[in-house]
Amino acid sequence: MRFAFVTLLILTVSTNIALAQNNQNADEAAIRENVKKLETGWNTKSGALFGSPFAKDADYVVINGMFFKGRTAIETAHQQIFDTIFKETTLTFTIRQIRFLRPDVAVAHVDGHRTGPTKELVQDALLTLVMTKEKEGWTIAAFQNTAVVARQ
């Protein structure tokens, strides 16, 4: 009887650990997909696609320190730059780290590299994204874009 109880306990704990790991893997995949949407939105010059991973009330700090509030403002501002100054640029994002603060809150650090036809349009950045798990899935609640100066 005692052996059966211990065996059942071990199986229950093992199952719960496996389920938690599967959930975290699915959550991490969803977070990675949001980063991919940002990259694809930029590279296809779609403000709507770029803005789609953001929460309706998201905070967005631009690389130059400008601040935007909300998905609509983020979409509009990006469509404006896609149609003008950044229309010939591309972005590449590489996720450096995803850290779960809680099961429904994560911080992602992403290396970004922008290329363009002139030296002034080439830029490296480190992005910090705070993401929350909502009913509709993972959304970006806050976004900080920080320029990275090349070391010489």
Image: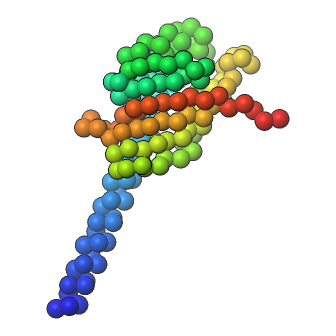
Between 92 and 64, the one nearer to me in the picture: 64
Furthest toward the right, the residue is: 152
Q: Quadrant of the C terminus?
A: top right
- For residue 40, above or below residue 3: above
Percent coordinates x, y for residue 105 in the rendering: 38, 44
Q: Residue at x 33, y 59 (%)?
A: 20
Q: Is residue 83 visible?
A: yes
Residue 86 relative to residue 10: left or right: right
**In the image shown, does 28 or 118 lie closer to the viewer?**
28
Residue 32 picture quarter: top left
Residue at position x 47%, y 24% from top?
60
Q: In this rendering, is residue 91 above or below 85? A: below
Rendered position, 15 above or below 132: below
Let me know if residue 33 appears in the view.
no
Against 80, is 16 above or below? below
Q: How many labels were placed on the picture?
A: 0
Quadrant occupied by the N terminus: bottom left
Who's the residue at 58% across and 21% down the image?
65
Give the percent coordinates (x, y) of residue 131: 40, 38
Compared across the picture, whether 23 is left or right of 50 comes to: left
Position in image of residue 16 (x %, y %): 28, 66
Which image quadrant for residue 14?
A: bottom left
Extreme residue in the left direction: 1
Camera-side residue of 73 and 116: 73
Colour approach in the figure = rainbow
Query: Where's residue 44, x and y in %?
Result: 49, 21
Q: Nearer the viewer, residue 37 or 74?
A: 74
